Image (cartoon, rainbow, N blue to C red):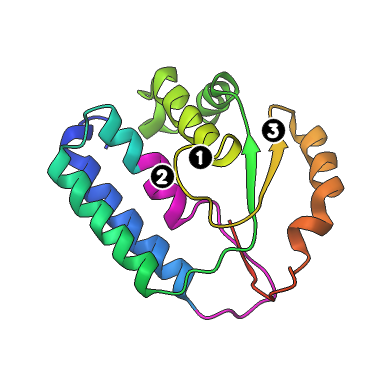
């Protein structure tokens, strides 16, 4: 996808939308379900980024958007908390380089900046799309030891069920 985004964006995002729907829909077997990303972030951040950067043609964007709208209108996708690990694009880029995943070596920092702005507009400013749940913003430019302390400070809110009893978290 990173090597030829115009060719693979629709394929990848269609597959992501399917797998996110499957994850959201699977039976709840434990008290809390956490997801790294959700069907909402796939649409509101990644699909939007492909479209706004002219990687995804308008017709592909329209098809994915129609599918997304149909899914949220016809499937129960409860979310009771969004934990946004707010990280600067520069920190993401450093971490990406440190991981050394071969498929990520060609990702430019500008791509991460675009994603960051979409997350900020959606989850912090709440100016772009409807946010499906309360948002807990956690600054995450810290190192692992500091992040563990920050997590512990928010642990109860992250893991404690809300009054409606919904247990899906992403």
> Which of the two discs, 3 and 2, labels the residue nearer the N terminus?
2
Residue 160: x percent and y percent? 78, 65
Q: Is residue 101 visible?
A: yes
- Please state which of residues 69 and 141 is positioned toward the viewer in this rendering: 69
- Please state which of residues 70 and 95 is positioned toward the viewer in this rendering: 70
- Residue stretch rendered in magenta on the structure: 27-46
Residue 59: x percent and y percent? 13, 45
Tell me the residue that label 3 is attached to.
Answer: 140
Circle 3 Cα neighbour tier, 10 Å, few/some/many (<14 / 14–19 / ≥20): some
Cα distance between the residues tagged 1 and 3: 18 Å
Mark sitting on residue 44: 2
Cα distance between the residues tagged 1 and 2: 7 Å
Residue 7: x percent and y percent? 15, 38
Cα distance between the residues tagged 3 and 2: 21 Å
Say which residue appears at 57% left-offset and 34% top-offset: 125
Vertical placement of residue 103 versus 32, above or below: above
Instruction: Identify the residue at the far front of this view.
Output: 127
Circle 2 Cα neighbour tier, 10 Å, few/some/many (<14 / 14–19 / ≥20): many
Local secondary structure at mark 1: helix
Q: Nearer the viewer, mark 3 or mark 2?
A: 2
Q: Quadrant of the C terminus?
A: bottom right
Mark sitting on residue 122: 1
Vertical placement of residue 110 versus 168, above or below: above
Please give the count of numbered marks on the rendered protein.
Answer: 3
Q: Is residue 119 magenta?
A: no
């Amino acid at each position: 996808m990173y090597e030829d985004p115009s060719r693979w964006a629709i394929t990848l995002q269609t597959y992501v939308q399917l797998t996110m729907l499957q994850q959201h829909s699977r039976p709840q077997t434990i008290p809390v379900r956490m997801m790294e990303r959700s069907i909402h972030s796939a649409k509101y951040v990644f699909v939007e980024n492909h479209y706004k950067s002219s990687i995804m043609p308008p017709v592909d964007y329209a098809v994915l958007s129609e599918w997304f709208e149909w899914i949220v209108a016809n499937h129960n996708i409860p979310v009771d908390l969004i934990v946004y690990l707010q990280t600067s694009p520069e920190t993401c880029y450093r971490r990406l380089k440190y991981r050394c995943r071969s498929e990520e070596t060609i990702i430019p920092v500008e791509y991460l900046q675009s994603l960051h702005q979409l997350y900020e507009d959606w989850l912090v400013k709440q100016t772009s799309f409807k946010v499906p749940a309360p948002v807990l913003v956690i600054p995450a430019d810290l190192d692992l030891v500091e992040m563990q302390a920050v997590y512990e400070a928010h642990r109860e809110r992250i893991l404690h069920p809300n009054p409606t009893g919904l247990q899906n978290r992403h």
